[in-house]
Amino acid sequence: PRGGDAITGIAEAERHGAVVNQAGTARDANGTLVTAGGRVLAVTAVAADLAAARAKAYEGVAAVRFDGAQYRTDIAAKATA
């Protein structure tokens, strides 16, 4: 993603039980959280089993929004199949 795009939904992701770790983020002149390029966020979760943790993490991913967002859809897919 390019830099300067507003990031929303982190609080919602955390309400779903996900943990959102910031990497390529910054604050703009207004204090808004924005992308700063590269790998922007890592969304993880802990649950009773791997399938539940995967589901919770992807609920968190779905809540986070910014232009140009990309994410893998295959994390733990083989292990939970």
Image (spheres, helix red, strand yellow):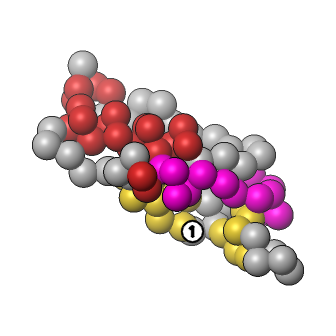
Vertical relation: 38 (above or below) 65 = below
Residue found at x 70% / y 68%: 33
Magenta stretch bounds: 1-13
Question: Going by the image, does 53 lie left or right of 65?
Answer: left
Q: Is residue 37 visible?
A: no
- Is residue 25 within the magenta segment? no
What residue is rendered at 24% in x and 51% in y? 46
The answer to whether 74 appears left or right of 26 in the picture is left
Q: Is residue 3 magenta?
A: yes
Q: Is residue 44 above or below residue 81?
A: below
Disc 1 crowd rating (10 Å Cα; few below 14, some 14-19, many 20+) is some
Percent coordinates x, y for residue 56 in the rendering: 35, 40
In the picture as drawn, the residue positioned furthest to the left comes out as 48
Identified at 75% across, 44% down, the residue is: 68
Q: Which residue is mark 1?
A: 23
25 lies left or right of 46:
right
- Tag 1, which secondary structure? loop
Percent position (x, y) of residue 26?
70, 74
Q: Residue furthest top?
A: 81
Q: Who is closer to the viewer here, 39 or 43?
A: 43
* Vertical placement of residue 33 versus 7, above or below: below
Q: Image point 77% across, 58% down: which residue?
A: 6
Q: Quadrant of the C terminus?
A: top left
**Residue 52 location, quadrant:** top left
* Residue 30 visible in the displayed image: yes
* Amino acid type, label 1: Ala
Q: Position of residue 54 (x, y in %)?
A: 32, 37
What number of labels is visible?
Answer: 1
